[in-house]
Image: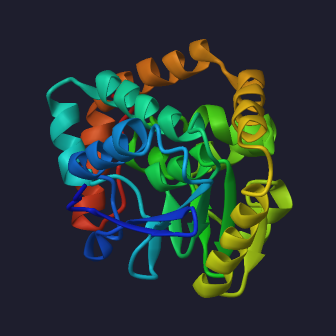
Amino acid sequence: MSYQNLLVEEHDGIVTLTLNRPKALNALNADTLKEIHRFFGTDYRDRTDIHGVILTGAGGRAFVAGADIKEFLGVANDGNGEAMAHRGHEIFFLIERFHVPVVAVVDGYALGGGCELAMACHLRIATEQAKFGQPEVNLGIIPGYGGTQRLNQYIGKGKATELILTGNPIDATEAHRLGLVNYVLPDREAAHAKATELLQTIGTKGPIAIRESIRAINAYYENKEGFAAEARAFGNTTKTADFQEGAAAFIEKRKAEFGGR
């Protein structure tokens, strides 16, 4: 099993999966998403000899800084925004429904799709340098990989609405206070050690009980209508002139001037 954009290490039943596009701040391009899908949906789906996965990003600057905007713009120009959102939902559901716990170790930026990826994991451990946010409104669109649904679940409607409508990020301390993050540690090494400790503890429990606990917890929050509504709304916003302006402004590193079209 070889990957272009993922690094995989196994030790004592714990798999560390590292998103390895540090020059691009581990942005989620199509190839990376396909490999994440393959890892959780095929290659490791039936691995009963593991008891946990640590998901992290290479480079130290970002867990995942968002989507690959130029590639993203191309998909939207083809009118495939809604299908793109559904595909993202499918991949992130594989993580959320994985048979063993997936722990996100977030060091640096977890923005847009990166925040959504972290929220699809069962637990989140952040370094003091971590920042979380859904800044899609700055591009004239909305979160499309589950952000409107899962952020509500973790921190409540009021605060989730504020963060999504303003696009403002929060630091690790605030994320922990709100319940988005389970632990905050000084640095990447300490965060990884905490993730390992948690998974080692969980690994001593009954594997069937762990698997069924994950299923039962997820069942409380499953909302197909909400995710479908997000995908439709995301698709609608990708067809607007505002998105074209927002994406162009991002690429050109200037402030967007939205016209409401």
Q: Is residue 171 visible?
A: no
Q: Quarter-wise, where is residue 120 in the image?
A: top right
Q: Nearer the viewer, residue 212 or 37?
A: 212
Q: Residue at x 35, y 37 (%)?
A: 42
Spot occupied by residue 16 in the image (x, y as percentages of width and height): 49, 66
Q: Number of callouts in the render?
A: 0
Residue at (77% x, 26% y) in the render: 216
Up-down relation of residue 142 to residue 132 (above or below): above
Residue in view at x 39 percent, y 31 percent = 260
Q: In the displayed structure, would residue 77 be above or below residue 192? A: above
Residue 174: give x, y in percent of width and height: 78, 66
In the image, 214 versus 233, the foreground residue is 214
Q: Is 67 left, or right, of 114 in this rendering?
A: left
Left or right, 89 with reference to 259: right
Q: Quadrant of the N terminus?
A: bottom left
Q: Nearer the viewer, residue 245 or 49?
A: 49
The vertical placement of 74 against 22, above or below, is above
Chosen colour scheme: rainbow
Direction from residue 207 to residue 137 in the image, left or right: left
Rendering quarter of residue 13 = bottom right
Relative to 236, does residue 1 appear above or below in the rendering? below
Residue drawn 39% across the image and 81% down it: 59
Residue 134, position as x, y percentages in the image:
54, 50
Q: Give the quadrant of the C terminus.
A: top left
Q: Position of residue 258 (x, y in %)?
A: 37, 43
